[in-house]
Image (cartoon, coloured by chain):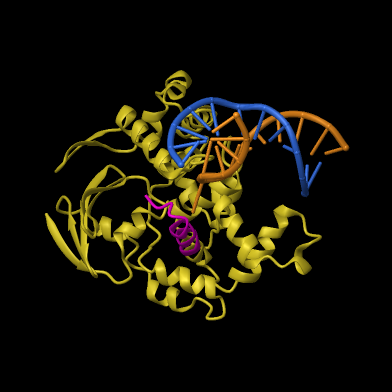
Chain colours: A yellow, B orange, C blue
Amino acid sequence: MKYTEMIPNLNLEQIAQSGQCFRMTPLFKGPGGPVRYQVISRGRLALMGQEGQRLSLECPRGDRDFWLGYLDCGTDYGKILASADPEDAYLREAARLGSGIRILRQDPWEMIITFVISQQKTIPHIRALTESLSSRWGQAIQGPEGIQYAFPTPIQLSQASLEQLLSLKLGYRAKYIHRLSQDAAQGRLDLKALEGMGYQEAMDYLMGFYGIGKKVANCICLFGLHHIEAFPVDTWIEKILMREYYDEEKYKDVPKTRMYERIIQEHFGQYEGYAGVMQQYIFYYERFKSNKLA
DNA sequence: TGCCAGGCTTCAC
DNA sequence: GTGAAGCATGGC
């Protein structure tokens, strides 16, 4: 079934390159860049394309609302963009450049595993490993482009032995994924409960599991639980905070771990409840300037 | 070759 | 509680 929707502040290419989603695949590269994407989430598959604000959505009848929710159509990104501090030139420019980025509503379990994979990996490599897990343990889906694979459920992934995971070249992350899958399959990691938690509660809960630290927990909160106040600090954000927002007078005696919290509070605290969207703009902008988008 | 990638755990202090 | 070492693998 094909649907057409008008959605402001949506740019599929920017979203696909924003590092929040690893299962959005460009199917055709035209002269103006990729124009059509295959997207897989929660066992469903859709093809998406766009011309301006016009989104074309190709998916099974009945999945339309699911995908509109996935694209976070209920959130007013125009309002968020307009709220970027006029005196913060870096953020203004970042928001302008990435104005088509939205925070997708993705599956928490998939975010847990993909962001555990993400540690010390490049984005193309995270994509490849996520694809490997899916094709090896996920459910097959018949799509217009052939057989594709859903991301494996906790039960499915818990069938994978540590040796099998190691053979995929997951490195030291294999043992994290193995234990997390056992935990989730056996209910020690309670995904239903997780979805009902607020931001802080979810952070504390997630960081209690082997292989999940503060940065990964924040990514899970932001991309899997839609706690858009979450502000993950990775090496890129670290670089930005130090170059654009660091003040030696204020922070010279503050320990590093506390310093980032202080800088974020000072410069992004005003975006109460949605600082994570601003985080995505600056992350995308920095990578754009470094020519790292792919 | 050396350094870095959407970091985390472990271990000294 | 803070900071450094060690960790797997691949690309530049």
Residue at 23% x, 46% y: name it.
A45
Q: Is residue A5 visible?
A: yes
Q: Is residue A152 depicted above or below A11 in this figure?
A: above
Dividing the picture into quarters, in which one does residue A66 lie?
Answer: bottom left
Residue stretch in magenta: A281-294
Q: Is residue A110 depicted above or below A202 in this figure?
A: above
Residue at 32% x, 56% y: name it.
A70
Q: Is residue A185 visible?
A: no
On-image quarter of the N terminus of chain A: bottom left
Residue at 49% x, 47% y: name it.
A193
- Observer-nearest residue: A285 or A216? A285
Q: Position of residue A269 (x, y in %)?
A: 60, 70
> Does the magenta portion include A256?
no
Task: Looking at this view, name the residue that lies furthest to the left.
Answer: A1
Asked if residue A15 lies left or right of residue A208, the reply is left
Asked if residue A72 lies left or right of residue A196, the reply is left
- Observer-nearest residue: A250 or A221? A250
Q: Position of residue A42 (x, y in %)?
A: 31, 45
Dividing the picture into quarters, in which one does residue A12 lie?
Answer: bottom left
Q: Position of residue A22 (x, y in %)?
A: 37, 45
How many discs appear?
0
- Observer-nearest residue: A225 or A216? A216
Q: Is residue A179 depicted above or below A2 in this figure?
A: above
Residue at 53% x, 27% y: name it.
A175
Q: Position of residue A184 (x, y in %)?
A: 47, 34
Task: Looking at this view, name the residue that lies furthest to the bottom.
Answer: A86
Q: Main secondary structure of the magenta part?
A: helix
